Amino acid sequence: MGIELLTLVLLLCIFFFFALGAQVALALGGIAMAIGYMTWGEGIFNVIPTTLEATFFSFILLAIPLYIYMGQLLTKSGIGDAMFNFSQMLIGRVRGSLAISVIGVCSMIGAMVGIIGAGIMTSGSIALRPMLERGYNRNLALGVIMAGGGLGILIPPSIPMIMFAASTQNSVGRMFLGAMMPALLTVVLMILYVVISCLLKPERAPKDTDAGIEVPKIEPREKFRIVRDGLCAMLLIVAVLGSIISGIATPTESGAIGVVGAILLAILFKRFKVDMFMHAGFQTATLVSVAMWIIFGASVFSNYHLLMGVQSMVADFTATLDLPPIMIIIMFQVIMLLLGFIIDEFIIVLMCAPLFTPIAVSLGYDPIWFGVLMIINILIAVQTPPYGFALFYLKGIAPPGVGMSDIYRSVTPFILLILCVLVLCMIFPQIVLWLPTTVMG
């Protein structure tokens, strides 16, 4: 069987089993092993132990449970609420302040957790109902939670970035630095959109006085507590990222620093409880076990496909198209965007990074630049109707009466903003490369 026909068969099998609702990890790994046995024989089963060793014993991937655990400790201890209150106090009672605070809090939570679901679930549970009770436009309220929550994979320490670096043998620190400017640009554009849209249509975000809500006065002691908790949470972010960028710690070691720091903050602020500690551990174990099985299944599938020569097929295909190099990069972006309709961000990285990155490098592009483009593309893909995974996180915490059509409408302007960031980073690569080059050479 030729590699072209084999690729078509693999893709058709994936779509078929996903349509049946099969487990992602079992579907990908099972398809690879079944078709591999028919095309290669018993030798295909040697892929399993080598992939298992590379996946579960990778020092870089060990950072994933540590970052997830850190995020669970921070959210379960209530420090996520403290971050929201701190952001709200900084912004003040301006029009749209709640929406702006959601974007800020999601950015900070994303910087500590690195996954999409945590930002959406935390900010949604804290801020969605207050925004709706204050008369905020439903589309605006849903949109800022969705868009801000998705920033978890663009703001370091991003789990998909760690996966990209591990699968392509690139520097995690350079990836983190490369994503900072696009992330900052995205946050600024989102805030500008909220401010401008609320100025043009004040009814989208009425002030508390307009809604007849009396704002309680915050006592000085309570202000001090809010500022203390917010600043300490931000210092933890600086410690985690700074230890990686400065070379003091590896990504895995910085994850351990984050976990210890989160526990110390909870104890210091008298929010540490044994039940909270155990619940965060169980939740982390559940998320990590699911993530690692998906990584393992996707890695088995990817390794089998690579062994059969898919990389050569893609390289030959791009060469026969006789397109300019930038058009090849755009073609890769479109493929990943389409994949985002049906699978989550982890699988897209694991399937596409080892396949597309060497081709991009052979065309003369920087792998860090291409990796950041991939992450921005995935950020768009997982929020794009009809099957973007992030859409269903938001539906899970939305109040009764909020349908999927409401969620689809709410995310559209924010998707366009992120698309603008993607285009700008493609046209001006220095947006991505300036910071890692300046800091790390």
Image (cartoon, rainbow, N blue to C red):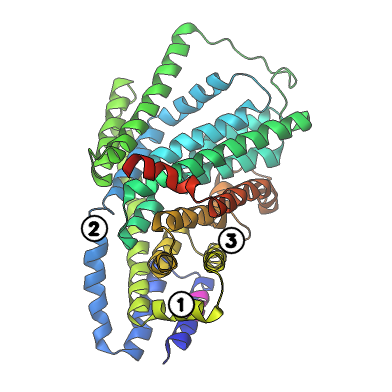
Direction from residue 354 to residue 181 in the image, left or right: right
Direction from residue 62 to residue 379 in the image, left or right: right
- The residue type indicated by label 3 comes to Tyr
- In front here: 8 or 2? 2
Q: From the top left corner, tell me how far across and down residue 38 is, in percent.
A: 35, 90
Quadrant of res 228: top left
Q: How crowded is mark 3: few (under 14 residues within 10 Å), some or many (20 or more)?
A: some
Quadrant of res 211: top right
| Residue tagged 3 | 387
| Residue tagged 2 | 58
Residue located at (25% from left, 80% from top): 45
Q: From the top left corner, tell me how far across and down residue 202 is, in percent.
A: 77, 28
Q: In which quarter of the image is the N terminus?
A: bottom left
- The residue type indicated by label 1 comes to Val
Quadrant of res 365: bottom left
| Residue tagged 1 | 314
Q: From the top left corner, tell me how far across and down residue 88 is, in percent.
A: 55, 23
- In front here: 182 or 430? 430
- In front here: 181 or 197? 181
Sequence order check: which comes first, mark 1 or mark 3?
A: 1
Direction from residue 256 to residue 152 in the image, left or right: right
198 is higher (above) or lower (below) than 165? above
355 is higher (above) or lower (below) than 92? below
Label 2: which secondary element: loop
Q: Quadrant of the C terminus?
A: top left
